[in-house]
Amino acid sequence: MPLTPDLAAFLAPPAPAHLPLPPAAHPAPGVRLLRGVPYAYRAGLRPLELDLWLPDESHRPLPVVLYLHGGGWRAGTRTELGPRFRHWKPDPFARLAQAGFAVACVDYRLSGEAVHPAQLEDAAAALEWLNARADELGLDPRRTVSWGESAGAHLAALLALTAPLSGCVAWYGPTDLTTLPGQCPPGSYDAADPTTREALLIGAAIADAPELARAASPVAHVHAGAPPFLVLHGTEDALIPLAQGEQLAAALRGAGARVDFRPVPGADHGWAGLSDEDAERCFTASVDFARACTAGPLPGVRA
């Protein structure tokens, strides 16, 4: 029996922008954590949630880091900055909050739940939620940097190229799904395979749907008005070749956008193979970049 309009309205979940916030935890000195905040509802799916890390005391309104996790668009967790940082105490997100940022760590639909552009739509919905609750939380969403690792870097780049952000930090992410198969070692990637991570993201094998693959690629959305980008990519990345980072940097540079491209010597995917000191340098460089992007004009960098 179909629902009457009145009953459907009564049973509908409340708008996430109006839900009460969860009680804050205090996982590190000077840091508040609002864990598991619903930011969007999708029909037939779990509520989409984010964790919001905030400094206890700060000059407000706060600049925002919107973080998107990796995992090949089919796995991963919003609770970590990648496997290389699992042992960090305090947590990297707590360190960002201690540095004066609000950090929104965002869940999004995985490829087993929906295909592109659903993931980008979810990231955009999280940004809308941050805007809607900015006054309440003391945020300045006009000063927002997207930050992602691996598949999350792909989404962070897409978001920065399609929404009014202040900057983007992209760690070892795929940037052109159409060229990725040819950049991988011979025999390691079959563009006709419908079960690759990228094929599951777009809903078809890369070889069978080049237009879909291109539309899902950050390089296809580069424009002169793009915000500044920091692109870090390991020189020994066996999963997403360094050429993918080079390609995004070249496209941004060619469009006249600002990009700081830094190959990370000796690093495999996820910063495997890096010393603790070098992994910390990657993190610190990214924090410094985010601070520069949200503090005012960033000097042009075209390296």
Image (cartoon, rainbow, N blue to C red):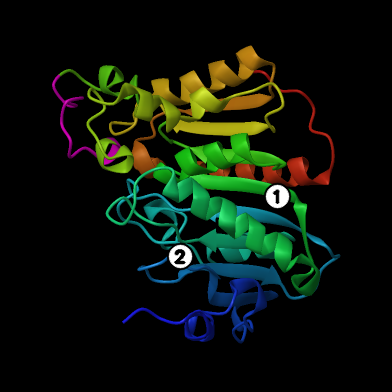
Q: Quadrant of the N terminus?
A: bottom left
Position in image of residue 278 (x %, y %): 50, 41
Could you tell me if residue 269 is visible in this image?
A: yes
Q: Which label number is shown at residue 144?
A: 1
Q: Nearer the viewer, residue 117 or 256?
A: 117
Whichever of callouts 2 and 1 sits on the residue coming sooner in the sequence is: 2
The residue under label 2 is which amino acid type? Thr
Name the element at disc 1: strand
Q: Which label number is shown at residue 79?
A: 2
Q: Is residue 190 magenta?
A: yes
Q: Quadrant of the C terminus?
A: top right
Name the element at disc 2: loop
Q: Nearer the viewer, residue 110 or 2?
A: 2
Position in image of residue 35 (x %, y %): 53, 76
Magenta span covers which residues?
187-198
> Magenta stretch: dominant SS?
loop
The residue under label 1 is which amino acid type? Thr
